[in-house]
Image: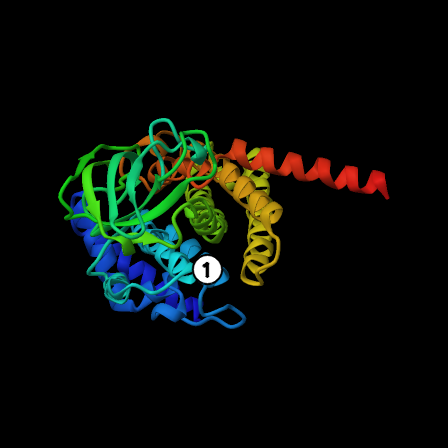
Amino acid sequence: MNLSELEAFARTAAERIEAVEGEGEQAQVALQVLAEGGWLRWTVPAAWGGAQHAGVSAERIGVRALCDARKTFTYASGMLDVMFVEQGLGSFPIALGAAQGDRAPWMEAVFQGVLAGTTISAFALTETGAGSDLAAVATRAEGNAEQGWVLNGEKTFISNAGIAGFYTVLARTQGQPGDRDGLSMFYVPAEAEGVSVERFAVMAPHPIGTVRFEGVRLEPDQCLGAPGKGMAIALGTLATFRTSVAAAALGFSRRAFDESVRHLEQRVQFGRPLSAFQGLRFDLAEMDVRLRAGELLMQEAAELVDLEVDSGTEVARAKYYATENASWICDRAVQHLGGLGVKRGQIVERLYREVRALRIYEGTSEVQKLLLGKAALERFRERSVD
């Protein structure tokens, strides 16, 4: 991969996206340019027509490459990044499900559409009562693997709601909300009878909304993998993509840092550039160190995920640190620009809004800290026993 080529593509793509108005229209342009550039191949395993990366199984996605892409895309355009990553998040459960069983006839065509950018994917886990706690999922699919299923329930905060061609949906096939077992993953075409969408707005431009399923009939092969194994597919998808959230945060952070440096060098107050003031130089120093630390944590985590070794602790560190610091770095950039920093249309104002959600989705900062605290205690106990 040529990083210079990737950066040049991202700059040109951002210009094309910003030339149109409206979330839906910008999303479509972003997907179109990603497909034209061949970058959607990075969101799909090689076994399904995606890119093959050195040292990465053909059944998996190259996480180091995914991180390089997201870090570059968020530097240029948040919309470019979200349309890129959602193609992978929504379709990878199909690949994981197929690895548990047989390839269904429809799967090849779905991946061809994902790669061509003609089919938009969406990953539907979250519910009003089920965010960090996926065991609380209440959406239910009644039926069996021989006769098919009927899906009822509601998902919310679903990226690409309303523009997606299909949803991969986590639903309960056994047990009650709160049970970790009994969850299954389903492929649900957006045009299926009984699927409806209500879009809503969030603080940064982002196609998102609530998706309702009312008596949606599904064929037996639309259950991805074995019934009851949906939690493993959901967690496997998140484990693959979570490190790339850190990368997205670093791209936003790097852009905010560069905008700060540029402004401090150019803005003159009290007869000298702002960059001459010691306090502001201290800010730049801390921004720089936090950025570099985040990059090293991300690189460590991505490499371990690609090697398919236990990397839960490293991924949690990277996701927590990079996303929390992105908010701090973007906040300092707003402060450096003063009144301009809060003016709608300024780059740092946009970054400040776009970066906030990263501390919530794909595992909140609090969940990452729980994981890290537990791991620290386990390491201490193991040393105490020795």
- Residue 71 in view, yes or no: yes
Residue reaching furthest to the top:
129
Q: Which residue is mark 1?
A: 68
Secondary structure type for disc 1: helix
Instruction: Say above or below: 352 vs 262.
Output: above
Name the residue nearer the viewer: 155 or 217.
217
Residue 54 on image: x %, y %: 51, 73
Please, which colouring scheme is shown?
rainbow
Q: Residue at x 40, y 29 (%)?
A: 177
Which quadrant: the C terminus?
A: top right
Residue 375 on image: x %, y %: 67, 40
Q: Residue at x 59, y 33 (%)?
A: 370
Which quadrant: the N terminus?
A: bottom left
On the picture, is 195 further left or further right than 343? left
Name the residue nearer the viewer: 174 or 277.
174
Name the residue nearer the viewer: 174 or 195.
174
Q: Amino acid at mark 1?
A: Asp
Label 1: how many Cα within 10 Å (few below 14, some 14–19, many 20+): some
Residue reaching furthest to the right:
386
Q: Residue at x 60, y 55 (%)?
A: 300
Q: How many marks?
A: 1
* Quadrant assignment, res 143: top left
Instruction: Say above or below: 169 vs 364.
Output: below
- Residue 269 in view, yes or no: no
* Quadrant assignment, res 174: top left
Name the residue nearer the viewer: 29 or 141.
141
Residue 92 on image: x %, y %: 37, 56
Residue 95 on image: x %, y %: 38, 60
